[in-house]
Image (cartoon, rainbow, N blue to C red):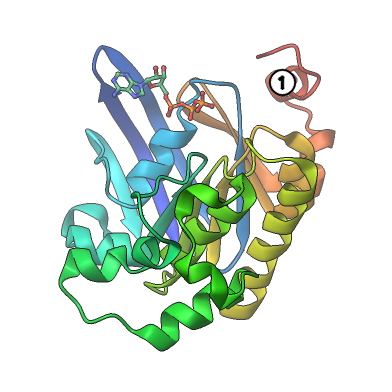
Amino acid sequence: MSKQPAIELKNVSLQRGEVLVLKGLTGQFPEGRITTIIGPSGAGKSTVLKLCNGLLSQDSGEVTILGKPLSEWEPAELRQQAGIALQSAPMISGTVEENLTLPYALHGAEVDVDKVNRMIQEVGLDTNYLQRDIRDLSGGQRQKVSIARTLLTEPAILLLDEITSALDRASRVEIEELIQYIHQTYGTTIIWITHNLEQAERIGHYTWVMMDGKLVEEGASELLSHSTNPQVQRFIKGSVS
Ligand SMILES: Nc1ncnc2c1ncn2[C@@H]1O[C@H](COP(=O)(O)OP(=O)(O)OP(=O)(O)O)[C@@H](O)[C@H]1O
């Protein structure tokens, strides 16, 4: 692990509605590495990701992102530094280009055409795709557009929430390769929630196992299957859903 983590959580608690979702969670995401997060449904994985780009803030404890407390970040700046991509890859109706230039439109900024052209190609799509209606794209292609849109702001941290869960095997492999390429090319810190244990081991350098609002185990991804923690063993064997 690098000396300075990209993100550090110390004794973080967070309540949503009636539910205490995070219960004194402490852990780090190493800078410039791919960390995968696994754990049963409702463990609080998505909530951690939303904390990491300021969509939520903690009730108690400390969250430090790129050396600065979450509360001191200007929200738009944090969202630029910590970009998020979701399983649903939400899009506006219109063309691929309109979706890619949305971040510029939202900030009233001039569109950097060269960058848009470069990014669509970086994710493995031809520039001809820019004029296509977003509805005509496959799930895998949509996810690539979603990733390209996130990359346009040149984030230091890429937050991925189940981005391959809805995809077939071929598209899943393409997206995994794309994320590895992005990591190698830009040195981006990647935090990737997945339900797929094999994917967590295959893609991650480092893995968090979350259960019931806490981090119950963290370490090198390949060591996951050798965990001596009985809770983690049960989860890996599929007895915890
Ligand atoms: N807006 C909300 N209001 C109330 N409770 C919420 C809200 N959002 C999430 N929760 C609850 O917080 C808990 C953790 O949710 P979270 O989405 O972080 O879990 P998760 O580990 O990502 O689960 P999954 O794998 O199913 O996506 C769940 O019990 C969920 O019902």
Query: On screen, 110 above or below 107?
Result: below
Residue 2 lies, in percent from the top left, at 57, 68
Which residue occupies the foreground of this view, 201 or 218? 201
The mark total stands at: 1
**Quadrant for ligand 1?**
top left
Going 41% across and 72% down the picture, which residue do you hit?
A: 152
Q: Quadrant of the N terminus?
A: bottom right
Is 209 displayed left or right of 225 in the figure?
left
Q: Is residue 187 in view from this perspective?
A: no
- Is there any visible trace of residue 75 in the rendered image? yes
The residue type indicated by label 1 comes to Phe
**In the rendered view of the protein, which quadrant contains the C terminus?**
top right
> 190 or 25, which lies in front?
190
Asked where in the image residue 165 lies, by quadrant, the reply is: top right
In this rendering, would 231 be left or right of 119? right
Assess disc 1: are there few (<14), some (14-19) or many (≥20) residues with their C-alpha within 10 Å of its C-alpha: some
Name the residue rendered at 79%, 39% in the picture.
198
Image coordinates for residue 118, horizontal then vertical, percent: 52, 82
Q: Is residue 4 above or below residue 116?
A: above
Report the residue at 22% width, 33% height from top: 59
- Work out whether 32 lies above or below 34: below
Q: Residue lying farthest bottom? A: 114
Q: Which residue is mark 1?
A: 235
Disc 1 on helix, strand or loop?
Answer: helix
Residue 179 percent across, percent down from the top left: 64, 62
| Relative side of 188 to 105, left or right | right
Q: Quadrant of residue 236?
A: top right
